[in-house]
Amino acid sequence: MSDHDLMQTEGEEASPVYERLRADIIAGAYPPGSALRFADMQKRYDLGVSRLREALAQLTADRLVVREINRGFRVPEVSLADFDDIAAMRLRLEPGAFRVSVENGDEEWEERILIAAHRLDRASRRYEAGTVNAVHDEWEARHRAFHEALIDACGSAMTRHFCGVLYDHFDRYRRLIGFDPDAQQRLASQHKALADCAVNRDVARAEAMLTEHVERTARVVRAALAEKLG
């Protein structure tokens, strides 16, 4: 099966197995470089080998899993160079997609932005250090939904797909360093500014605004990652 065959087409939903395994890898349930053993995964997900293989094949196509000949599957290692590459590619695609969305989005798109922004703000206000995982998981889901909504009207399913894959990789690094309440509070104000930019159709500022947001997040993640990796 080729990478093209594995890529999700417009309107096609990923399998629940893929979503669960992907979410666990991004959240750090499997540490970087760790082996993904079928026996362990069968117990964890209560699934057969064939369904796990399908999910792993798709995750391999998205580079969230590495397949090594005669050694099986494992989670990719992490490095500053890899994070820099991911951040650079995200900056090439996502801000431009946001600008096009601001240019072309209709009223329904505006409504999706406002709803996503409201839900993210509500989750942000609920989140405090030491709260239960459910609140943290809610914030992560709302944060992703907001960024997806920003580029939802770009008119390119391929762009949205690759932005989603890059977000996954970027997010894996962000979650590896842990949740920084102070940094997230500073970044939260930019979420509101991005939503206002979308609703006000500020095409001139859209691309630069999202670029600044991603760059600022990348600086926070990179500094913490450099300290973590020594």
Image: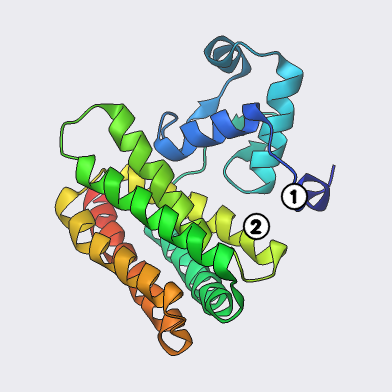
Name the amino acid type tagged 1: Met
Give how far across and how far down residue 137 sits, in percent.
36, 35
C-alpha distance separating marks 1 and 2: 8 Å
Furthest residue toward bottom: 204
Left or right, 73 with respect to 8, comes to left
- Neighbour class for label 2 at 10 Å: few (<14), some, many (≥20)? some
Give how far across and how far down residue 164 sits, in percent.
57, 55
SS category of the residue bearing label 1: loop
Q: Is residue 74 visible?
A: no
Q: Which dot marks residue 116?
A: none
Give how far across and how far down residue 127 sits, in percent.
22, 40
Which numbered disc, 1 or 2, marks the residue that appears first in the sequence? 1
Look at mark 2 in the image and give the residue it sits on. Answer: 161
SS category of the residue bearing label 2: helix
**Residue at x 42% of width, y 65% of height:** 84
Vertical arrangement, residue 165 with respect to residue 157, above or below: above
- Neighbour class for label 1 at 10 Å: few (<14), some, many (≥20)? some
Furthest residue toward front: 107
**Residue 194, quarter of the rendered image:** bottom left
Look at mark 1 in the image and give the residue it sits on. Answer: 7
Name the amino acid type tagged 2: His
**Residue at x 16% of width, y 31% of height:** 130
